Image (tube, rainbow, N blue to C red):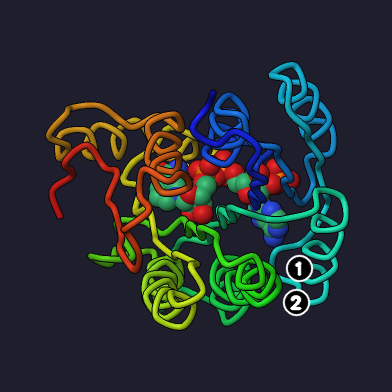
Amino acid sequence: MGLLAGKVALITGATRGIGRAIALKYAAEGANIAFTYLSSAEAAEQLIQEIETLGVKAAGYRSDAASYEQAHTLATEVHKTFGRIDILVHNAGITRDTLLMRMSEEMWDTVIDTNLKSAFNITHAVAPIMARQRGGSIVYMSSVVGIGGNAGQANYAASKAGLIALSKSVAKEFGARGVRANCIAPGFIQTDMTAVLSDEIRASFVENISLRRAGTPEDVAGVALFLGSELSAYVTGQTIPCCGGMKG
Ligand code: NAP
């Protein structure tokens, strides 16, 4: 029996990278998977098939995480289709990097809406379902830059810091109903998001990592499995770095 046998997980942004690895890891541990994406319809179809070969149920939804209405429609549909929601992984996120004085209002707003307001949207929609069930685990995908800040990523770092405070607040508000809320703070992970970085920047990151390698989406999925499962039954309001010992 898997660690998540019979559970229902909703994962935002699972067509690529970290979200995809979490969806497959959860499915391999017996969870039924609902996931979202924004534009990768073909990748979504492929993921559904891969998940189903693991012997669990899967459904993909095109749902813009930045939209309050779409988040609520999504939660209603997932609840109707799967009957419950045990785990929410809010993973969808984007970057629009540049130095603060070059950052447009649009770059700021887009990142805050997609990475942080989205977390309010989906928590507002899903937490009441978990509270009625008297149990659930919410995992937010923050970042090490949400803890330490980063030049050229003021919008992104602020959005990821916001997730940490949000998770602590949700942990306090919903703890009495058995709902837990935690963050993962990944460091430098090899995905499409970091593929745009130059070899030079990549090498400088790796030099600052104790384990001397970039992380993989599967590295992060392992932490997400811990936080989503009963292995972390007494853990809430915490942020777990998954960064290979990256120096701040
Ligand atoms: P990625 O490869 O760029 O994948 C992003 C995923 O989010 C895709 O599935 C994408 O869907 C989805 N998405 C983007 N905007 C969305 C929206 N508005 N609504 C719904 N889905 C949306 O990213 P990643 O590297 O796996 O990162 C995943 C999370 O980890 C992000 O929150 C990121 O900030 C965080 N993180 C990553 C790193 C890293 O080094 N990679 C480090 C720290 C934290 P489509 O395919 O349809 O576009």
Could you tell me residue 47's position as x and y percent?
74, 28
Q: Is residue 21 above or below residue 75?
A: above
Badge 1 density bin: few <14, some 14–19, many ≥20, Cα 10 Å: many
Could you tell me residue 15's position as x and y percent?
69, 38
Q: Can residue 99 be seen here?
A: no
List the residue tagged with mark 2: 68
Q: Amino acid at mark 2?
A: Tyr
Query: Where residue 71 is drawn, which disc sits there?
Result: 1
Q: Is residue 23 above or below residue 164?
A: above
The C terminus: image quadrant = bottom left
Residue 227 relative to residue 138: left or right: left
Residue 166 relative to residue 31: left or right: left
Badge 2 density bin: few <14, some 14–19, many ≥20, Cα 10 Å: some
Tag 2 secondary structure:
helix
Q: Can residue 107 be seen here?
A: yes
Q: Residue at x 78, y 35 (%)?
A: 58
Q: Is residue 215 above or below residue 98?
A: above
Count of marks placed on residues: 2
Could you tell me residue 129's position as x and y percent?
69, 69
